[in-house]
Amino acid sequence: MKYLCIIGGFDPTGHAGVLRDAQVVQRCGIAAQTLVTALTIQNDRKYFGHHILPTNVFLRSWEALPLKELTAVKIGMLGSLSIVKNLVTQLERLKRVNKRVKVVWDPVFSSSSGGELLPLSAVRWAVKNLTPHCDLVTPNTNEVLQFVKPRSSQPETWCAAFWQKYHVPVYLKGGHLPTRARDWLHDGRKLVILDGQKSGKKIRGTGCYFATAVACGWVQGKSLLVTCQLAKEMMQREFC
């Protein structure tokens, strides 16, 4: 059997984090294993706080995974520098025993309800050390500025700068821009623009939803471009 591993925080509303991921996995009919990094206390209006799980709990959970049967890993909230460092070590080991596995990272550094999900020192370390182990990173237009400092204000330039610096494909989400729901995928060979309808509602967890849908597409054997296109179509049907 092929599995998807979901790594992220628990949001009690179900609108983000591993509960949102689980909704997508169920829709796609994929078998998943879940590793929780933190318990958050929040609703759609306010972030009250969180409890980061001990690193040894994260590592014990990782040991229970069927590593050779993992097809994809989706990373969301990490919570602490210790978890980030240990995750990088585990990904290095995973890719030695399972060379086909794909990793997508949704770099959620803060919650849309107002909470800090990863300290700045951990953000900087993750950007430098976790990014090279990924097969796709899916920042929004705010998060991407932690990765690159482009001189231009054009998203196309941000994507090119990301690839040039990390040699990792990037899917830049434009949902935070006051325009259409335009995204940009740069895979190192070409830049693809994906347009869609922008929802008039304030929706949490769209980043979780998209990255998990991409990971599900990989489990199903689809290419990067196709799985990104299908993930965006899923979101359009769900939220627009």
Image: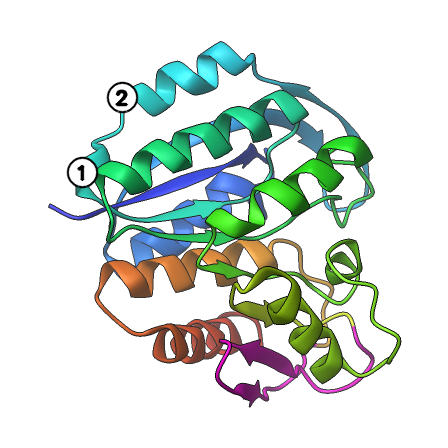
Pick the quarter of the image with the N terminus: top left
Pick the quarter of the image with the C terminus: bottom right
Q: Nearer the viewer, residue 187 or 41?
A: 187
Residue 164 figure quarter = bottom right
The image's mark for residue 68 is: 1
Q: Is residue 145 magenta?
A: no
Mark 2 nearby-residue class (10 Å; few <14, some 14–19, many ≥20): few
79 over 220 or under it: above or below: above
Q: Which SS class for mark 1? A: helix
Residue beneath the point at 83% across and 71% down: 150
Q: CA distance from mark 2 to mark 1?
A: 12 Å
Tell me where residue 6 appears, x and y as whole percent: 41, 41
Which circle, 2 or 1, is nearer the viewer? 1
Tell me where residue 151 appears, x and y as whole percent: 89, 75
Give the total of numbered labels: 2
Residue beneath the point at 60% across and 70% down: 163
Which amino acid type is shown beneath numbered disc 2? Ala
Q: Is residue 18 left or right of residue 177?
A: left
Residue, far left: 1
Q: Is residue 51 left or right of residue 18?
A: right
* Magenta span main SS: loop
Residue identifier under label 2: 64
Q: Which residues are magenta?
A: 177-199
Q: Is residue 192 magenta?
A: yes
Which amino acid type is shown beneath numbered disc 1? Lys
